[in-house]
Amino acid sequence: MSNNLMDKIVSLCKRRGFIFQSSEIYGGLGSVWDYGPLGVELKNNVKKAWWKSVVYQREDIVGLDAAILMHPKTWEASGHVSGFADLMVDCKKCKKRFKVEDLKDRKKCEECGGEFTEARPFNLMFETYHGPVKETAAVVYLRPETAQGIFVNFLNILNTSRKKLPFGVAQIGKVFRNEITPGNFTFRTREFEQMEIEYFVDPKEADKQYKFWVEERFDWYFKFGIKKTNL
Ligand SMILES: [Zn+2]
């Protein structure tokens, strides 16, 4: 999408009360957006329609609303602490930060021609402190995905919902990613909402279930012209 068209969409969304930039009167906070009076209704309608189709209209999926803050071990076990990172370089002159994968072998800063620092990983999880003491032991993360809240509650749900495999858990919630190169309006932001299902199956049935989900459940999408290769 051209920048010009995107600018028009952003300004239309603002004029009509759908989406405003966060903290706009203070100059705005980058890549964070507020949903206005019409935007919040639109978003709630989408969430309600999704919840109805995946939770209320199915026997095999239940809902969950897990907390944003989780035990830090969650993110060590999931690999996010060590792996949820992009390799970054800084320009030594203008201090701008770039993703290595975006450089495509460029050796100098495209803004000012400056030299780059060594590449190093930059973790995308927002950190904060749990409790009143600011110390390393108290570091927790704002979740970068909702899935982990589902995984850590798997046994609780299995023991209390009378579901047997295969079954799924659906969740809608805020997630946070400290994107280095955000942009393109609401398509890549630092705070956003996910709607997610984790579907649990007996490993012996994994292939069968996968085939079922890809080839039958998604028929509906294909009717709207979405190609299988895009899923
Ligand atoms: Zn530079």
Image: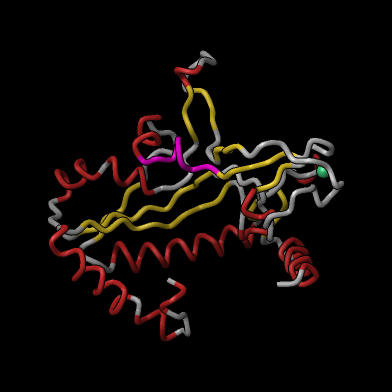
Residue at position x 73%, y 53% from top? 106
Residue at position x 49%, y 47% from top? 174
For ligand 1, which image quadrant applies? top right
Q: Is residue 31 left or right of residue 149?
A: right
Residue at position x 83%, y 39% from top? 94
What is the x, y in percent for residue 142? 50, 36
Q: Is residue 66 left or right of residue 110?
A: left
Residue at position x 43%, y 57% from top? 195
What is the x, y in percent for residue 51? 37, 62
Count of numbered circles on the image: 0
- Depth check, front residue: 155 or 11: 155
Q: Is residue 72 above or below residue 145?
A: above
What is the x, y in percent for residue 58? 25, 67
The image quadrant that residue 48 belongs to is bottom left
Asked if the stretch drawn in magenta spans residue 84, the answer is: yes
What is the x, y in percent for residue 218? 35, 76
The image quadrant that residue 156 belongs to is top left
- The magenta segment is 78-85
Q: The C terminus appears in which quarter of the rendering? A: bottom left
Q: The N terminus appears in which quarter of the rendering? A: bottom right
